Image (tube, rainbow, N blue to C red):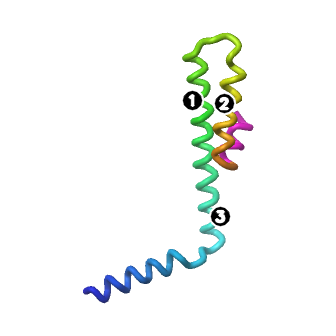
Amino acid sequence: MRLWVCIVLLSTVLCASADRPGIVQGAIRAGQFVRDAARGSWDMYRAYRDMREANYRGADKYFHARGNYDAARRGPGGAWAARVI
């Protein structure tokens, strides 16, 4: 039993450290882009919600800039979301 557990753990470690095929890396990159875009959209929404809560005339440029900055820091997906929104 211990031998099989050791073999399974060793094979898991070897598979995890091996190079992934290109399609898997592309899927992982696409997933990260989508995750960054969703989080960037959330940053933009949070800035909009704060702007509505502040209810101060003329402060919209500050909140839009803050939302864009926070979203762009997320990565390529966040920068895309900031540009689109």
Q: Nearer the viewer, residue 68 or 80?
A: 68
Farthest residue in the right direction? 83
Q: Look at label 3 and name its amino acid.
A: Gly
Select label 2 or label 1 by which is in front: 2
Residue 42 x, y percent position in the rendering: 57, 36
The relative height of residue 83 versus residue 11 in the rendered view (above or below) is above
Q: Magenta part mainly helix, strand or loop?
A: helix
Q: Earlier in the sequence, mark 1 or mark 3?
A: 3
Q: Nearer the viewer, residue 51 or 41?
A: 51
Give the class, few, some or many, for how many residues have Cα within 10 Å of label 1's Cα (few <14, many ≥20): some
Looking at the rendering, which quadrant does residue 30 occupy?
Answer: bottom right
For numbered disc 2, what is the local secondary structure?
Answer: helix
Find disc 2 in the rendering and name its residue.
66
* Magenta run includes residue 63: no
Looking at the rendering, which quadrant does residue 44 occupy?
Answer: top right
Q: Which image quadrant: the N terminus?
A: bottom left
Highlighted range, magenta? 77-85
Q: Earlier in the sequence, mark 2 or mark 1?
A: 1
Q: Look at label 2 and name its amino acid.
A: Arg
Q: CA distance from mark 1 to mark 3?
A: 30 Å
Q: Residue 10, which numbered label?
A: none
Q: Look at label 1 and name its amino acid.
A: Arg
* Magenta run includes residue 82: yes
Residue 29 x, y percent position in the rendering: 63, 59
Find disc 3 in the rendering and name its residue.
26
Select label 1 or label 3 by which is in front: 1
Q: CA distance from mark 3 to mark 2?
A: 31 Å
